[in-house]
Amino acid sequence: MAEDTIFGKIARGEIPADIVYEDDDVVAFRDLHPQAPTHVLVIPRKPIPTLNHAVVEDAALIGRLFLAAAKVAEQLGFAEDGYRTVINCNADGGQTVFHLHVHLLGGRPLQWPPG
Ligand code: AMP
């Protein structure tokens, strides 16, 4: 059983978040410390700690995270201009919350490569 995190609590509605999309499997909410004009986190309700913990049975769920990100980008009006989706993994990736999440960043031109 994965350890509970703040994102697990958000997924279960136990603590508030600025939710922009949700369905049976996925929740998307605004990041508290946005790194772009729009910064949304897309999480599975299932608590998978990191991408390293994903198994083949999670493949469709992980696909749904990205489809939800694209839907949110469309809904918030920057799908055509473009955006970035990122999954950070463990220390070198900069992961701080150990519940798998996709960052959706948009609203301005983003630098590449990132720092
Ligand atoms: P990462 O560093 O990839 O694990 O990303 C974690 C992200 O979660 C950071 O961008 C934080 O700003 C964000 N964050 C942490 N707690 C919350 C919260 N309660 N609501 C929304 N975003 C949060």
Image (cartoon, rainbow, N blue to C red):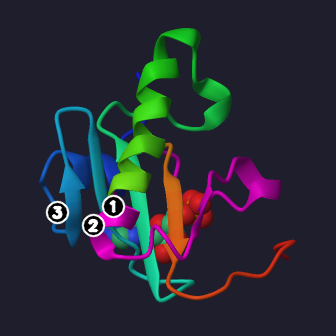
Crowding around mark 1 (Cα neighbors within 10 Å: few <14, some 14 to 19, many 20+) is: many
Most extreme residue toward the left is 13
Residue drawn at x 42%, y 36% is 3
Residues at marks 3 and 1, CA–CA distance in whole angstroms: 21 Å
Q: Which residues are magenta?
A: 72-99
Q: Is residue 2 visible?
A: no
Query: What label does residue 75 carry, if any?
Result: 2
Q: Residue 15: image x %, image y %?
A: 17, 63
C-alpha separation, residue under disc 3 versus residue under disc 2 = 24 Å
Specify which label sits upstream in the sequence, 3 or 2: 3
Residue 1 in percent (x, y) is at 40, 21
Residue under numbered circle 3? 15
Farthest front residue in view: 80
**SS assignment at label 1:** helix
Q: Nearer the viewer, mark 3 or mark 2?
A: 2
Q: Earlier in the sequence, mark 3 or mark 1?
A: 3
Amino acid at circle 1: Val
> Residue placed at 85% from the left, 76% from the top?
115
Q: Amino acid at mark 3?
A: Ile
Mark 3: is the Cβ under 8 angstroms from ligand 1? yes
Kind of residue at disc 2? Gln
Residue at 52 percent across and 20 percent down: it is 59
